[in-house]
Image (cartoon, rainbow, N blue to C red):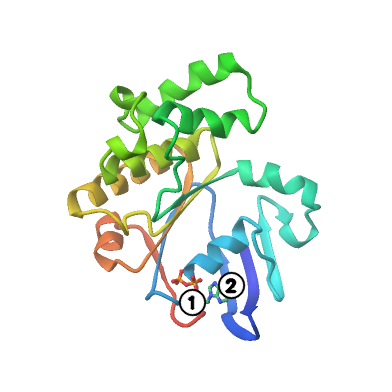
Amino acid sequence: IKLRDVYTTYDNEEVLNGVSLEIKDGEFVSIVGLSGAGKSTLLRLMTREILPNKGEIILDGVNLADLPSKAVPLLRRKIGTIYQDFKLLSNKTAFENVAFAMEVCGMDEEEIKNDVPKVLGIVGLAEKLNSFPHQMSGGEKQRLAIARALIHRPRIILADEPTGNLDYVNSYDVLKLLMKINELGTTVILATHNKNMVNSVGRRVITMEKGKM
Ligand code: ADP
Protein backbone atom coordinates (compact mmCIF):
# COMPACT_ATOMS: atom_id res chain seq x y z
CA ILE A 1 0.00 0.00 0.00
CA LYS A 2 1.49 3.34 -1.03
CA LEU A 3 0.16 6.79 -0.28
CA ARG A 4 1.86 9.70 -1.97
CA ASP A 5 1.26 13.20 -0.67
CA VAL A 6 -2.41 12.63 0.09
CA TYR A 7 -4.73 15.51 1.02
CA THR A 8 -8.35 15.03 2.09
CA THR A 9 -10.90 17.63 3.07
CA TYR A 10 -14.40 17.35 4.51
CA ASP A 11 -16.53 20.47 4.00
CA ASN A 12 -13.42 22.52 3.08
CA GLU A 13 -11.70 21.46 6.29
CA GLU A 14 -8.36 19.75 5.77
CA VAL A 15 -8.31 16.35 7.47
CA LEU A 16 -5.28 14.71 5.86
CA ASN A 17 -2.48 17.05 5.21
CA GLY A 18 0.10 15.64 2.82
CA VAL A 19 0.33 12.05 4.00
CA SER A 20 2.94 9.75 2.44
CA LEU A 21 3.26 6.19 3.62
CA GLU A 22 4.31 2.76 2.42
CA ILE A 23 3.14 -0.49 3.99
CA LYS A 24 4.68 -3.71 2.74
CA ASP A 25 2.93 -7.00 2.23
CA GLY A 26 2.82 -8.93 5.51
CA GLU A 27 3.51 -6.00 7.84
CA PHE A 28 1.65 -5.31 11.09
CA VAL A 29 1.35 -1.54 11.34
CA SER A 30 -0.32 0.37 14.13
CA ILE A 31 -1.59 3.87 13.52
CA VAL A 32 -1.94 5.73 16.75
CA GLY A 33 -3.34 9.19 17.39
CA LEU A 34 -6.00 11.07 19.31
CA SER A 35 -9.61 10.93 18.23
CA GLY A 36 -10.01 13.22 15.20
CA ALA A 37 -6.40 12.82 14.05
CA GLY A 38 -7.52 11.31 10.73
CA LYS A 39 -6.96 7.57 11.29
CA SER A 40 -10.38 6.42 10.05
CA THR A 41 -10.11 8.73 7.06
CA LEU A 42 -6.82 7.08 6.15
CA LEU A 43 -8.46 3.63 6.28
CA ARG A 44 -11.48 4.83 4.26
CA LEU A 45 -9.13 5.96 1.51
CA MET A 46 -7.63 2.47 1.35
CA THR A 47 -11.04 0.84 0.81
CA ARG A 48 -11.94 3.58 -1.67
CA GLU A 49 -14.93 4.71 0.35
CA ILE A 50 -13.52 8.17 -0.34
CA LEU A 51 -11.05 9.53 -2.88
CA PRO A 52 -8.37 12.05 -1.93
CA ASN A 53 -8.53 15.67 -3.08
CA LYS A 54 -4.88 15.42 -4.04
CA GLY A 55 -2.23 12.69 -4.10
CA GLU A 56 -2.17 9.02 -4.99
CA ILE A 57 -3.14 5.77 -3.30
CA ILE A 58 -1.71 2.60 -4.80
CA LEU A 59 -2.98 -0.73 -3.49
CA ASP A 60 -1.56 -3.97 -4.83
CA GLY A 61 -0.23 -2.09 -7.87
CA VAL A 62 -3.53 -0.36 -8.65
CA ASN A 63 -4.03 3.39 -8.43
CA LEU A 64 -7.39 3.62 -6.67
CA ALA A 65 -8.32 6.81 -8.51
CA ASP A 66 -8.17 4.85 -11.79
CA LEU A 67 -10.26 1.93 -10.53
CA PRO A 68 -13.65 1.75 -12.29
CA SER A 69 -16.52 1.54 -9.81
CA LYS A 70 -17.45 -1.94 -11.02
CA ALA A 71 -14.02 -3.14 -9.83
CA VAL A 72 -14.48 -1.75 -6.31
CA PRO A 73 -16.23 -4.86 -4.88
CA LEU A 74 -13.28 -6.96 -6.01
CA LEU A 75 -10.86 -4.56 -4.33
CA ARG A 76 -12.90 -4.78 -1.11
CA ARG A 77 -12.65 -8.57 -1.12
CA LYS A 78 -8.91 -8.17 -0.75
CA ILE A 79 -9.52 -6.14 2.39
CA GLY A 80 -11.22 -7.33 5.57
CA THR A 81 -12.49 -4.55 7.84
CA ILE A 82 -13.21 -4.57 11.56
CA TYR A 83 -14.81 -1.72 13.49
CA GLN A 84 -15.26 -0.64 17.10
CA ASP A 85 -19.02 -1.34 17.01
CA PHE A 86 -18.73 -4.83 15.37
CA LYS A 87 -21.43 -4.13 12.74
CA LEU A 88 -23.04 -7.56 13.16
CA LEU A 89 -26.55 -8.45 12.03
CA SER A 90 -28.48 -8.85 15.28
CA ASN A 91 -31.19 -11.13 13.85
CA LYS A 92 -28.65 -13.64 12.52
CA THR A 93 -26.61 -16.27 14.36
CA ALA A 94 -22.81 -16.36 14.33
CA PHE A 95 -22.94 -18.89 11.50
CA GLU A 96 -25.43 -16.79 9.54
CA ASN A 97 -23.49 -13.56 10.02
CA VAL A 98 -20.45 -15.09 8.33
CA ALA A 99 -22.53 -17.05 5.78
CA PHE A 100 -24.29 -13.84 4.73
CA ALA A 101 -20.97 -12.24 3.76
CA MET A 102 -20.39 -15.23 1.46
CA GLU A 103 -23.93 -15.33 0.05
CA VAL A 104 -23.81 -11.71 -1.12
CA CYS A 105 -20.71 -12.62 -3.12
CA GLY A 106 -22.51 -15.51 -4.76
CA MET A 107 -20.67 -18.37 -3.00
CA ASP A 108 -22.53 -21.66 -3.10
CA GLU A 109 -24.08 -23.46 -0.17
CA GLU A 110 -21.47 -26.19 -0.05
CA GLU A 111 -18.59 -23.70 0.26
CA ILE A 112 -20.51 -21.88 2.96
CA LYS A 113 -21.15 -25.06 4.96
CA ASN A 114 -17.50 -25.98 4.66
CA ASP A 115 -15.82 -22.61 5.28
CA VAL A 116 -17.94 -20.96 7.97
CA PRO A 117 -17.30 -23.52 10.76
CA LYS A 118 -13.59 -23.50 9.84
CA VAL A 119 -13.23 -19.75 10.15
CA LEU A 120 -15.30 -19.68 13.35
CA GLY A 121 -12.91 -22.32 14.70
CA ILE A 122 -9.90 -20.11 13.88
CA VAL A 123 -11.32 -17.28 16.01
CA GLY A 124 -12.28 -19.64 18.85
CA LEU A 125 -16.05 -19.60 18.31
CA ALA A 126 -16.61 -23.22 17.28
CA GLU A 127 -19.07 -23.62 20.17
CA LYS A 128 -21.04 -20.48 19.31
CA LEU A 129 -22.20 -21.28 15.77
CA ASN A 130 -25.86 -20.94 16.70
CA SER A 131 -25.60 -18.04 19.13
CA PHE A 132 -27.03 -14.64 18.31
CA PRO A 133 -24.90 -11.53 18.93
CA HIS A 134 -26.96 -10.62 22.02
CA GLN A 135 -25.97 -13.99 23.52
CA MET A 136 -22.26 -13.25 23.10
CA SER A 137 -19.74 -11.19 25.09
CA GLY A 138 -18.10 -8.11 23.56
CA GLY A 139 -14.93 -10.08 22.89
CA GLU A 140 -16.87 -12.88 21.20
CA LYS A 141 -18.73 -10.37 19.04
CA GLN A 142 -15.49 -8.83 17.89
CA ARG A 143 -14.01 -12.26 17.16
CA LEU A 144 -17.12 -13.01 15.10
CA ALA A 145 -16.57 -9.77 13.17
CA ILE A 146 -12.97 -10.89 12.59
CA ALA A 147 -14.21 -14.27 11.29
CA ARG A 148 -16.47 -12.45 8.85
CA ALA A 149 -13.55 -10.23 7.76
CA LEU A 150 -11.44 -13.33 7.09
CA ILE A 151 -13.96 -15.25 5.02
CA HIS A 152 -12.66 -14.07 1.63
CA ARG A 153 -9.04 -14.76 2.66
CA PRO A 154 -8.14 -11.07 2.43
CA ARG A 155 -4.59 -9.87 1.85
CA ILE A 156 -5.15 -6.98 4.24
CA ILE A 157 -7.08 -6.52 7.49
CA LEU A 158 -8.00 -2.97 8.48
CA ALA A 159 -8.98 -2.75 12.14
CA ASP A 160 -10.42 0.61 13.16
CA GLU A 161 -10.39 0.94 16.96
CA PRO A 162 -11.30 -2.78 17.30
CA THR A 163 -10.86 -2.84 21.07
CA GLY A 164 -12.68 0.44 21.74
CA ASN A 165 -15.70 -1.29 23.28
CA LEU A 166 -13.81 -4.06 25.09
CA ASP A 167 -12.32 -4.53 28.53
CA TYR A 168 -8.63 -5.23 29.00
CA VAL A 169 -8.84 -9.05 28.84
CA ASN A 170 -11.02 -9.12 25.72
CA SER A 171 -8.91 -6.40 24.09
CA TYR A 172 -5.82 -8.49 24.61
CA ASP A 173 -7.55 -11.57 23.10
CA VAL A 174 -8.54 -9.61 20.01
CA LEU A 175 -5.03 -8.23 19.69
CA LYS A 176 -3.50 -11.70 19.98
CA LEU A 177 -5.87 -12.92 17.27
CA LEU A 178 -4.84 -10.07 14.94
CA MET A 179 -1.20 -10.95 15.59
CA LYS A 180 -1.88 -14.60 14.78
CA ILE A 181 -3.63 -13.63 11.53
CA ASN A 182 -0.61 -11.49 10.67
CA GLU A 183 1.77 -14.38 11.38
CA LEU A 184 -0.24 -16.44 8.89
CA GLY A 185 0.66 -13.86 6.22
CA THR A 186 -2.08 -11.21 6.21
CA THR A 187 -1.10 -7.55 6.36
CA VAL A 188 -2.73 -5.94 9.41
CA ILE A 189 -3.32 -2.23 9.92
CA LEU A 190 -4.57 -1.33 13.37
CA ALA A 191 -5.85 2.20 14.06
CA THR A 192 -6.31 3.13 17.71
CA HIS A 193 -5.99 5.97 20.21
CA ASN A 194 -4.79 3.43 22.78
CA LYS A 195 -1.01 3.57 23.16
CA ASN A 196 -0.95 0.61 25.56
CA MET A 197 -2.49 -1.60 22.88
CA VAL A 198 0.11 -0.53 20.38
CA ASN A 199 2.95 -1.04 22.83
CA SER A 200 1.87 -4.60 23.51
CA VAL A 201 1.96 -5.35 19.75
CA GLY A 202 5.59 -4.23 19.60
CA ARG A 203 5.65 -3.68 15.84
CA ARG A 204 5.87 -0.67 13.52
CA VAL A 205 3.98 2.37 14.79
CA ILE A 206 2.90 5.45 12.86
CA THR A 207 1.73 8.41 14.89
CA MET A 208 -0.87 10.74 13.42
CA GLU A 209 -1.51 14.23 14.64
CA LYS A 210 -3.98 16.64 13.04
CA GLY A 211 -3.86 14.92 9.65
CA LYS A 212 -0.08 14.56 9.51
CA MET A 213 2.13 11.51 10.08
P1 ADP B 1 -9.90 9.44 13.84
O1 ADP B 1 -10.23 8.15 13.19
O2 ADP B 1 -8.41 9.64 14.07
O3 ADP B 1 -10.69 9.71 15.08
P2 ADP B 1 -11.29 10.68 11.61
O4 ADP B 1 -10.57 10.32 10.36
O5 ADP B 1 -12.54 9.94 11.94
O6 ADP B 1 -10.25 10.64 12.82
O7 ADP B 1 -11.66 12.21 11.57
C1 ADP B 1 -10.72 13.23 11.25
C2 ADP B 1 -11.45 14.59 11.21
O8 ADP B 1 -12.38 14.59 10.14
C3 ADP B 1 -12.26 14.91 12.46
O9 ADP B 1 -12.13 16.27 12.72
C4 ADP B 1 -13.68 14.55 12.06
O10 ADP B 1 -14.60 15.32 12.77
C5 ADP B 1 -13.69 14.87 10.59
N1 ADP B 1 -14.62 14.00 9.82
C6 ADP B 1 -14.57 12.65 9.75
N2 ADP B 1 -15.54 12.17 8.94
C7 ADP B 1 -16.21 13.24 8.48
C8 ADP B 1 -17.34 13.40 7.59
N3 ADP B 1 -17.93 12.34 7.01
N4 ADP B 1 -17.78 14.65 7.35
C9 ADP B 1 -17.17 15.73 7.92
N5 ADP B 1 -16.11 15.64 8.76
C10 ADP B 1 -15.64 14.42 9.04
Residue in the image at 65% along x and 32% along y: 105
Question: Where residue 175 sits in the image (x, y, percent)?
Answer: 30, 49
Above or below, comparing residue 9 to residue 170 in the picture? below
Marks 2 and 1 close (CB-CB < 8 Å): yes
Q: Position of residue 197 (x, y in %)?
A: 27, 60
The amino acid beneath tag 2 is: Ser
Q: Residue at x 40, y 30 (%)?
A: 94
Res. 49 image quadrant: bottom right
| Amino acid type, callout 1 | Met
Residue 139 position (above or below residue 127): below
Residue 134 appears in which quarter of the rendering? top left
Q: Residue at x 67, y 63 (%)?
A: 57
Provide the residue designation for mark 1: 213
Quick check: 161 above or below 136? below
Residue with the most extreme top position: 110
Spatial CA span between label 2 and label 1: 8 Å
In what element is the residue under mark 2? strand
**Quarter of the figure with the N terminus:** bottom right
Residue 1 shows in this picture? no
Which disc, if any, is residue 20? 2
